[in-house]
């Protein structure tokens, strides 16, 4: 075995130009493979970042104005949710709902001593913490007792604390929201980015009392049972949509008055898209790899032809066909593996170097997964064996007499 590898190294170093050309062919194939899959993974990472701060089984229910006349009602009618609708949904679908919250949106100037800025206000129910995947850093979240008492308590984002308190703790302090003092009972972080961490949460009943003394709710967010399959969760969202449209006398085909955003449906569509994209990229990368294999195979044919006399002498001295085959195969696999890893390394370096630039185009942290690296390694081994098999078999069939006569 050692003699075979010594011969391989000798052949590679003896024919540097031929070895380099062989390596460039394979390295380029694996380089392209790495770059293509890295970009696809970057698109996946970008999508995951945009939705990672929401529960994967969340359903967002938005309302607007009707665009179609229906059951005697004119188009242009404004649809508004109220607390009674929240209670109706909980009662009607309670067994299939994991968490549910209403949302009221506002924007206010918030100040603490000399520091002030304008921030988004979300008035919510306690379940919102789990639907938004909010992580408490200090203190607590909104509670049912806060709702019952219409307490002037708020939970602020990490960056709100940073802006207004300049490194000091905001817990227990009083903030002025539009002329009304609120007590900070918690500080949270959120993977959704800076926009989410510059948000302030308050009890929904408190907001309803302050902003109009009403029971209006701007939006509902709920999540289906974890035990539901993706298709069941999608069907559940359709069921809610149909029942709510009937409740508000909205035409079944009116998409303006009531809109549903089902994360299960979104995830299914995105996964299908990325599956198709991955297959497409794999076909392109595999085609390039096949071209590389053909190039290696052609070069190995040339090597066998060049060494015909040598191989004939080996056979005349008693070398078995298996020895000839293994010698050619090992050289093919060796060249393919070394060149492939160089291509893989270059691809990784290029992706790492260009990650900030690609982020501007919606490609976040482009990289190749471990499973893809393992797959690429297996492809390299198989490719090297395939590229060298036919030339190796041809070499093993050389008759010593014919080989010795070769020029």
Image: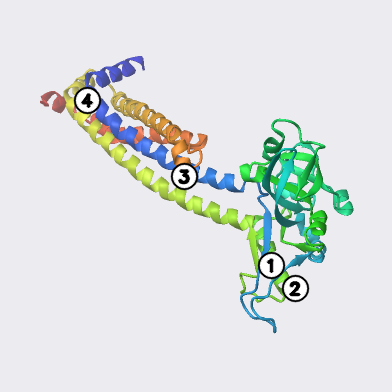
* Mark 3 vs 2, N-terminal side: 3
Give the camera-side residue of 218 and 167: 167
How much space separates mark 3 and mark 2, taking CA atoms? Answer: 43 Å
| Residue 326: x %, y % from top left | 33, 26
Q: Which residue is mark 3?
A: 40
Q: Are marks 2 and 4 in contact (CB under 8 Å)?
A: no
Give the camera-side residue of 259 and 241: 259
Q: Which residue is mark 4?
A: 17
* Mark 2 vs 1, N-terminal side: 1
| Residue 268: x %, y % from top left | 58, 55
**What is the secondary structure assignment of the residue under circle 2?**
helix
**Numbered label attached to residue 241:** 1
How much space separates mark 1 and mark 4, taking CA atoms? Answer: 68 Å
Q: Which residue is mark 2?
A: 247
How much space separates mark 4 and mark 3, taking CA atoms? Answer: 35 Å
Q: Are marks 2 and 1 in contact (CB under 8 Å)?
A: no
At x 71% / y 76%, what residue is drawn?
Answer: 249
* Mark 1 vs 4, N-terminal side: 4
| Residue 224: x %, y % from top left | 72, 56
How much space separates mark 1 and mark 3, taking CA atoms? Answer: 34 Å
How much space separates mark 2 and mark 1, taking CA atoms? Answer: 10 Å
**What is the secondary structure assignment of the residue under circle 1?**
helix
At x 34% / y 30%, what residue is drawn?
Answer: 336
Label 2 Cα crowd, 10 Å radius (few <14 / some 14-19 / many 20+): few
Q: How is the image coloured?
A: rainbow
């Amino acid at each position: 075995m050692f003699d075979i590898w010594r011969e391989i190294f000798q052949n590679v170093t003896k024919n540097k130009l031929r070895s380099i050309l062989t390596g460039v062919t394979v390295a380029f194939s694996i380089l392209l493979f790495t770059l293509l899959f890295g970009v696809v993974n970057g698109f996946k990472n970008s999508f995951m970042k945009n939705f990672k701060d929401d529960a994967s089984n969340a359903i967002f229910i938005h309302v607007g104005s009707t665009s179609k006349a229906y059951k005697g009602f004119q188009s242009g009618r404004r649809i508004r949710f109220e607390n009674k609708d929240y209670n109706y949904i909980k009662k009607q679908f309670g067994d299939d709902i994991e968490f549910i919250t209403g949302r009221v949106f506002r924007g206010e100037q918030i100040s603490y001593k000399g520091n002030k800025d304008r921030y988004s206000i979300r008035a919510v129910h306690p379940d919102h913490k789990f639907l938004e995947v909010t992580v408490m850093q200090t203190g607590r979240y909104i509670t049912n007792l806060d709702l019952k008492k219409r307490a002037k308590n708020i939970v602020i984002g990490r960056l709100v604390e940073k802006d207004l308190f300049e490194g000091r703790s905001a817990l227990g302090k009083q903030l002025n929201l539009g002329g009304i003092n609120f007590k900070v009972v918690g500080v949270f972080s959120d993977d959704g980015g800076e926009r989410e961490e510059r948000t302030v949460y308050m009890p929904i009943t408190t907001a309803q009392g302050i902003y109009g003394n009403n029971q209006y709710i701007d939006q509902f967010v709920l999540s289906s049972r974890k035990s539901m399959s993706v298709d069941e969760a999608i069907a559940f969202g359709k069921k809610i949509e149909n029942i709510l449209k009937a409740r508000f006398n909205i035409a079944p085909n009116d998409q303006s008055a009531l809109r549903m955003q089902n994360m299960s449906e979104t995830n299914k569509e995105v996964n299908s898209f990325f599956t198709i994209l991955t297959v497409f990229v794999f076909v392109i990368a595999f085609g390039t790899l096949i071209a590389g294999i053909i190039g290696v195979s052609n070069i190995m044919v040339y090597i066998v032809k060049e060494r015909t006399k040598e191989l004939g002498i080996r056979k005349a001295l008693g070398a078995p066909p298996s020895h000839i085959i293994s010698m050619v195969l090992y050289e093919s696999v060796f060249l393919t593996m070394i060149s492939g890893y160089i291509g893989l390394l270059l691809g990784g370096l290029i992706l790492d170097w260009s990650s900030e630039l690609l982020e501007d185009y919606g490609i976040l942290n482009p990289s190749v997964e471990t499973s893809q690296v393992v797959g690429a390694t297996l492809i390299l081994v198989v490719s090297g064996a395939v590229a060298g098999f036919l030339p190796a078999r041809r070499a093993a069939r050389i008759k010593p007499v014919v080989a010795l006569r070769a020029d």
